[in-house]
């Protein structure tokens, strides 16, 4: 059993080989991302969904070209069950993961028990309290995560990456998003448009692969 302390909830939470826990409620009645409990339900077979991930090869190539044989210090937002770690391009001991579904994180830690920091919660400064801005070589938000971050949040994500680092964003095109994502069309469009604005502003690169947009942007302030 691997014990980690939630950065957004003062109570400890046990992650390990057991039934994936439901996303629960904060003390004092504050809701803990109840919009994301659907992801708890699919966490046990989510790896099978990702087995044919169409942008996997492109992500591996992009990270490999930038960092070579050196594993980057990474922040993975919307980490799910650990797709980015599963690529083998990241070192768990150098990786911070964020996800609002504790069920997803439970499965991630089963596979990658040495993950440096596991933060259950949405992307925001409260969740990342104590995390160094500009401290990461790689910041990633893949699997449609940008739809839940918003444009200003995407800008903040870029600022979490070092100068010379990399921001990696993967959006579903609005007509190709799977039902399990739970994002409405306006969220999908906002996430995609926000990523494209950043790409244009910072001279990034976009690859469109089988209904997904993969955007690579240089990090830094």
Image (cartoon, rainbow, N blue to C red):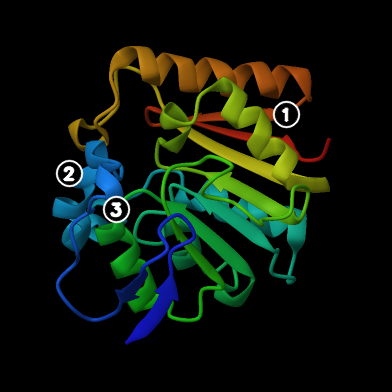
Q: Which of 157 and 11 is in front in this view?
A: 11
Q: Residue 100: x percent and y percent?
A: 36, 48
Question: Tag 2, which secondary structure?
Answer: helix
Left or right, residue 49 beside residue 127: left
Q: State the residue at coordinates (29%, 27%).
A: 177
Q: Distance between the residues labelled 2 and 3?
A: 21 Å
Sequence-earlier tag: 2 or 3: 3
- Label 3 neighbour load within 10 Å: few <14, some 14-19, many 20+: few
Q: State the residue at coordinates (49%, 60%).
A: 7
Q: Quadrant of residue 108?
A: bottom left
Q: State the residue at coordinates (58%, 30%).
A: 153
Sequence-earlier tag: 2 or 1: 2
Task: Tell whether label 3 touches label 2 (CB within 8 Å).
Answer: no
Q: Which of 173 and 76 is in front in this view?
A: 76
Residue bearing the label numbered 2 = 38
- Is residue 100 shown above or below 151? below
Left or right, residue 47 beside residue 186: left
Left or right, residue 214 beside residue 34: right
Residue bearing the label numbered 3 = 27
Q: In which quarter of the image is residue 219?
A: top right
- Label 2 neighbour load within 10 Å: few <14, some 14-19, many 20+: some
Q: Nearer the viewer, residue 56 or 13?
A: 13
Question: Tag 1, which secondary structure?
Answer: loop
Q: Residue 204 carries which label?
A: 1
Task: Tell whether label 1 touches label 2 (CB within 8 Å).
Answer: no
Give the label, 1 or 3, closer to the camera: 3
């Amino acid at each position: 059993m691997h014990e980690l302390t939630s950065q957004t909830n003062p109570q400890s939470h046990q992650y390990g080989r057991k039934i994936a826990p439901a996303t629960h409620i904060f003390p004092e009645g504050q809701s803990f991302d109840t919009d994301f409990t659907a992801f708890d339900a699919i966490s046990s077979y989510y790896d099978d969904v990702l087995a044919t991930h169409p942008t996997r090869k492109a992500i591996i190539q992009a990270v490999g070209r930038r960092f070579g044989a050196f594993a980057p210090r990474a922040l993975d937002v919307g980490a799910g069950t650990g797709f980015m770690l599963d690529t083998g391009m990241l070192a768990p001991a150098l990786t911070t993961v964020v996800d609002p579904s504790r069920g997803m994180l439970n499965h991630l830690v089963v596979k990658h028990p040495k993950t440096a920091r596991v933060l259950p919660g949405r992307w925001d400064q409260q969740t990342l309290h104590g995390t160094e801005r500009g401290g990461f070589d790689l910041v990633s938000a893949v699997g449609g995560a940008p739809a839940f971050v918003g444009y200003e949040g995407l800008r903040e994500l870029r600022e979490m990456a070092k100068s010379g680092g990399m921001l990696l964003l993967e959006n579903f095109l609005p007509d190709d998003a799977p039902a399990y994502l739970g994002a409405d069309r306006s969220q999908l469009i906002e996430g995609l448009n926000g990523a494209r604005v950043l790409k244009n502003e910072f001279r990034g690169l976009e690859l469109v692969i089988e209904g997904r947009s993969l955007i690579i942007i240089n990090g830094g302030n």
